[in-house]
């Protein structure tokens, strides 16, 4: 797969077609497949799935939560194998003179990319996560959910080509690998009802990534997979909690926020490998067990108040 043939002329045809506003819109659309956005999407679905009296919905939500983890470890493992470059100029953003200074670094981060280019991680992840959400959730009809997922995949994939950060073959391969991986994981997880199996797949792929290349990204991804898998089996699997009160929900959301802060701190500080692994595992475990922690904390507080109440 020679580098000149990977584009099939598409990046050249799209070069310079979009003006300043168009490029900003493309940079926004590409976030549909970014790790942070899909993690927030999956986390929101997971939290919303903890409906009282419906543990099956919680299991399906946990399956969706597992998919960004599978995505991250898979992309890290694959790109370390192929080591194919991106198009020239992928790491340089166009100048948008009217952007506020505070938004310039945000735009530059969204509109550029570095590292290896094959396969497209954004295309793989969007197919895996948005497609998995369409299969596992019960919002509206499956046809509507698949239409939304398909639209997200097409828009995001086009944005990667139009921004010049991927060749056409990178994007097509990413979508294809994401679709195959989703099918395999969905079937292994008993049509999304056994998220522990999906998380175990993430652990296995994450281990391959670490063995292939020991880096902050590979260690963090592996730590996330291990922490999420351990938390599901140790704290959740037998009786998934479905918080029934506002207090339980508040503690659950607070746990998610704190876990997100820990992830951000690790990302910004890039600590030594053992700290990265343990911190990532703890944060992921907290996210998976957030509803259960919320239920247990509120129940414990209520029991303590009952013991200390006079009479």
Image: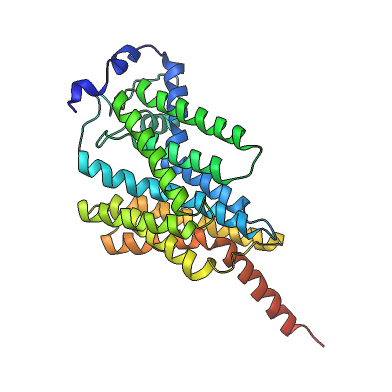
Residue sitting at x 37%, y 26%: 160
Which one is nearer the viewer's eye here, 32 or 241? 241
Position of residue 7 measured from the top left corner of the image (x, y, whole percent): 27, 21
The C terminus lies in quadrant: bottom right
- Whether residue 213 is visible to the viewer of this picture, yes or no, is no
Q: Residue furthest right?
A: 311
Q: Residue furthest left?
A: 2
Position of residue 205 measured from the top left corner of the image (x, y, whole percent): 31, 53
How many dots with numbers? 0
Left/right of residue 288 with respect to residue 307 in the rendered view: left
Image quadrant assignment for residue 94: top left
Left/right of residue 308 with respect to residue 5 in the rendered view: right
Which one is nearer the viewer's eye here, 301 or 135? 135
- Whether residue 291 is visible to the viewer of this picture, yes or no, is yes
Residue sitting at x 27%, y 47%: 77
Q: Is residue 180 above or below residue 26?
A: below
Residue sitting at x 19%, y 25%: 3
Q: Residue furthest bottom?
A: 311
The N terminus lies in quadrant: top left
Q: Is residue 167 above or below residue 61?
A: above
Which one is nearer the viewer's eye here, 178 or 180? 180
Left/right of residue 262 with respect to residue 289 in the rendered view: left
Residue sitting at x 44%, y 41%: 128
Q: Is residue 65 above or below residue 297?
A: above
């Amino acid at each position: 797969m020679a580098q000149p043939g990977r584009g099939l002329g598409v990046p050249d045809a799209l070069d310079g077609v979009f003006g300043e506003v168009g490029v900003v819109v493309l940079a926004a659309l590409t976030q549909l497949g970014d790790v942070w956005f899909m993690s927030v999407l999956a986390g929101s679905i997971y939290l919303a799935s903890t409906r009282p009296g419906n543990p099956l919905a919680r299991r399906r939500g946990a399956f969706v939560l597992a998919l960004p983890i599978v995505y991250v470890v898979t992309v890290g493992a694959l790109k370390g194998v192929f080591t194919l470059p991106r198009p020239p100029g992928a790491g340089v953003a166009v100048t948008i003179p009217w952007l506020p200074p505070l938004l310039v670094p945000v735009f530059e981060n969204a509109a550029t990319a570095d590292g290896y280019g094959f396969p497209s991680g954004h295309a793989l992840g969007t197919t895996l996560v948005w497609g998995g959400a369409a299969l596992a959730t019960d919002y509206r009809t499956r046809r509507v959910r698949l239409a939304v997922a398909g639209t997200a995949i097409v828009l995001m994939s086009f944005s990667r080509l139009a921004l010049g950060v991927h060749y056409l073959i990178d994007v097509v391969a990413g979508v294809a690998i994401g679709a195959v991986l989703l099918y395999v994981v969905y079937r292994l997880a008993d049509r999304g009802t056994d998220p522990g199996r999906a998380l175990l797949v993430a652990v296995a792929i994450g281990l391959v990534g670490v063995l292939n290349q020991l880096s902050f990204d590979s260690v963090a991804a592996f730590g996330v997979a291990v922490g999420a898998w351990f938390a599901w089996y140790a704290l959740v699997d037998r009786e998934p909690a479905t918080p029934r009160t506002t207090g339980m929900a508040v503690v659950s959301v607070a746990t998610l926020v704190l876990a997100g802060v820990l992830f951000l701190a690790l990302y910004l500080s890039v600590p030594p490998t053992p700290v990265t692994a343990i911190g990532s595992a703890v944060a992921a475990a907290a996210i998976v067990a957030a509803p259960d922690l919320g239920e247990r904390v509120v129940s414990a507080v209520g029991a303590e108040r009952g013991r200390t109440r006079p009479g």
